[in-house]
């Protein structure tokens, strides 16, 4: 039997695994996709390095943690408050995942979890069942609702009420002279934010620019038409050299992040059995961005705290 099973190999789940590894606990991470990272994904094409999901981090984002991962030298400041990773946000995922020696089950979906005496049972969609002393659930609310349906039905019911706004991330690599004089003026209710860079690690040379645009468009649009519309809205004078559009159905939790939100999260946690921790962007107490700057560091610390809670829980059980 494993000490801990972590369900979900996004930023939060991997941060938990990283800490479990340091604590010498036996753990397994179960990820439904063929890759780790969840909504953090970096692509390289024709000299452009594009982030398909989140990419901007606060400069105060847990610097000791970044140093431990060997990432301090890999950051590029964007403003006084924020930085991006030179080679894309997936650098963070790789730095967390590479040292992991624990078990990993990739392309395996967890369908439900239960409890047998003091152990958790983790049922996969292919029928396999695993045991663990403690459980860390690091998936968005709509998946957590289904996974917890039998074990914690009231919590599942509340998780099922979470609602999201979707967003498209459009990445465009183009010649610098194809851009209008002030690209920042193009931000509006559809192009929600635009980040433009000619940082050497992101573009082939200084004659080129990378644009990362957050676009509100209908989920059923096809990526090609989202790219076409975005190019037109930005007023590019030439076709981009590379272009991609990624749709994220659960990009932003619809929440006011006020006292009521805090109470929702706290009362949700109170409905979970001891030994099970729910982590991830949907369960943070603070808004995911402050003045547009990402707070991914909060996900990292959630992962670490969950791993510590699992360790404390297992120690207390063994003492009984
Ligand atoms: C376009 C975009 C922009 C964003 N910008 C910001 C930002 O500015 N600031 C910010 O704080 N956050 C932002 N986010 C959210 C940000 O990406 C997250 O905070 C962070 O990456 C979430 O990590 P996570 O581990 O909590 O969840 P996820 O990245 O969603 O990871 C969950 C993982 O669980 C896996 N999984 C799901 N169901 C199962 C199952 N049944 N069995 C096994 N595995 C399963 C998924 O495949 C995934 O890998 C953004 C997201 C997007 C898409």
Image (spheres, rainbow, N blue to C red):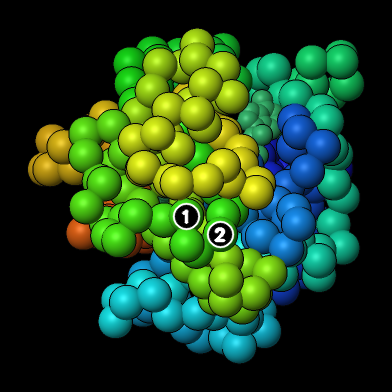
For image coordinates 34% across by 55% down, the residue present is: 180
Residue 47's quadrant in the figure?
Answer: bottom right
Q: Looking at the image, can residue 112 be seen?
A: yes
**Count of all numbered marks drawn on residues in the image:** 2
Q: Position of residue 238 (x, y in %)?
A: 52, 46
- Gap in angstroms between the C-alphas marked 1 and 2: 5 Å
Badge 2: residue crowd in 10 Å (few <14, some 14–19, many ≥20): many
Q: Is residue 147 shown above or below 87?
A: above
Q: Quadrant of the N terminus?
A: top right
The residue sitting at 84% across, 24% down in the picture is 129
Helix, strand or loop at label 1? It is: helix
Viewer-closest of 2 and 285: 285
- Residue at label 2? 175
> Left or right: where does residue 277 sit relative to residue 295?
right
Of residue 32 and residue 316, the one placed in the foreground of this image is: 32
Residue at image position (41%, 56%) is 179
Would you say 230 lies left or right of 310 here?
Answer: left
Q: Is residue 266 left or right of residue 226?
A: left
User: Residue 293: x percent and y percent?
Assistant: 31, 61
- Secondary-structure class at tag 2: strand
Q: Are marks 1 and 2 in contact (CB under 8 Å)?
A: yes
How dense is the environment of label 1, judged by Cα within 10 Å: few (below 14), some, or many (20 and up)? some
Q: Is residue 158 visible?
A: no
- Vertical relation: 305 (above or below) 73: above
From the top left corner, tell me how far across and down residue 284 is, in percent: 34, 47
Residue under circle 1? 178
């Amino acid at each position: 039997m494993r000490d801990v099973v972590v369900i979900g190999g996004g930023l939060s789940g991997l941060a938990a695994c990283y800490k479990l590894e340091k604590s010498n606990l036996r753990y397994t991470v179960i990820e439904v996709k063929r890759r780790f990272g969840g909504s953090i994904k970096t692509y390289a094409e024709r000299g452009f390095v594009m982030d398909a999901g989140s990419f901007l981090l606060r400069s105060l984002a847990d610097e000791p943690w970044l140093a431990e991962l060997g990432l301090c030298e890999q950051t590029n400041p964007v403003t006084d408050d924020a930085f991006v990773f030179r080679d894309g946000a997936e650098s963070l995922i790789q730095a967390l995942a590479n040292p992991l020696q624990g078990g990993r089950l990739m392309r395996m979906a967890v369908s439900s979890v239960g409890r047998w005496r003091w152990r958790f049972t983790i049922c996969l969609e292919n029928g396999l069942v695993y045991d663990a002393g403690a459980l860390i659930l690091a998936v968005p609310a709509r998946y957590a609702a289904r996974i917890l349906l039998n074990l914690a039905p009231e919590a599942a019911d509340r998780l099922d009420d979470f609602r999201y706004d979707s967003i498209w991330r459009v990445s465009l690599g183009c010649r610098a002279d194809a851009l209008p004089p002030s690209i920042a003026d193009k931000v509006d209710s559809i192009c929600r934010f635009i980040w433009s860079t000619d940082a050497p690690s992101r573009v082939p040379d200084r004659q080129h620019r990378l644009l990362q645009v957050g676009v509100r468009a209908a989920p059923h649009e096809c990526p090609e038409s989202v790219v076409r519309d975005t190019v037109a809205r930005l007023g590019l004078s030439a076709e981009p050299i590379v272009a991609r559009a990624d749709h994220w159905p659960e990009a932003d939790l619809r929440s006011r992040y006020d006292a009521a939100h805090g109470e929702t999260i706290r009362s949700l946690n109170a409905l979970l059995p001891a030994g099970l921790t729910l982590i991830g962007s949907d369960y943070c107490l603070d808004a995911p961005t402050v003045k547009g700057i990402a707070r991914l560091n909060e996900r990292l610390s959630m992962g670490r705290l969950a791993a510590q809670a699992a360790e404390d829980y297992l120690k207390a059980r063994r003492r009984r």
